[in-house]
Amino acid sequence: MSTKMISKDNAEHYVWGGDCDGWHLVKGPDLSVIHERMLPARAEVRHHHSRARQLFFVLSGELTMVLDGREELIRPNQGIEIAPGRTHQAANRGTTPVEFLVISQPMAQGDRIEAPRA
């Protein structure tokens, strides 16, 4: 098995939320590593995962994580672990884009349960 260098330049890219970016650095059923870029004034939908445990790790900018209704500000070189079943929402309340890694074990795709809208 050969080893291939991976970066945003050669990773599988997708757009979410209309104008936010994601790059699959590792995409397997047992492990997912995604590099995401979220523009200011954007947020994902509140949700939880039944199986996936996640780590959000900020590379640049500031990410607000809403966990069970409480907000945590995550700065560069900081991360927060989200256990399965915890309702969460990543948001960029800042004025610059935020870039972060989302590491999920197992893969979170197909394991997302959206929270009822308030």
Image: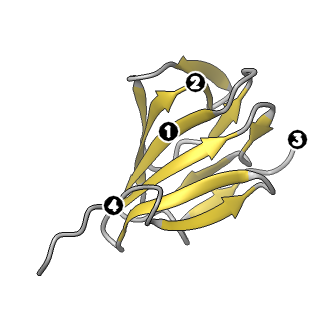
Residue under the point 75% across and 21% down: 95
Image quadrant for the N terminus? bottom left
**Residue 35 location, x and y as percent?**
48, 49
Marks 2 and 4 sit apart, C-alpha to C-alpha, by 22 Å
Nearer mark to the viewer, of 3 and 2: 2
| Residue 94 vertical position relative to residue 58 in the rendered view, above or below | above
**Residue 8 location, x and y as percent?**
47, 55
Q: Amino acid at mark 1?
A: Phe
Residue under the point 33% across and 61% down: 6
Q: Amino acid at mark 3?
A: Ala
Q: Which residue is mark 3?
A: 118
The crowding category of the residue bearing disc 4, from other C-alpha atoms within 10 Å (few below 14, some 14 to 19, many at least 20), is few
Residue under the point 55% across and 48% down: 36
The crowding category of the residue bearing disc 3, from other C-alpha atoms within 10 Å (few below 14, some 14 to 19, many at least 20), is few
Q: Amino acid at mark 4?
A: Ile
Marks 3 and 1 sit apart, C-alpha to C-alpha, by 27 Å
Q: Is residue 75 left or right of residue 77?
A: right
Q: Residue furthest right?
A: 118
* Upstream in sequence: badge 1 or badge 2: 2
* Upstream in sequence: badge 4 or badge 3: 4
Residue under the point 45% across and 43% down: 101
Q: Which mark is residue 100?
A: 1
Marks 1 and 2 sit apart, C-alpha to C-alpha, by 9 Å
Q: Which residue is mark 4?
A: 6
Q: Which residue is mark 2?
A: 61
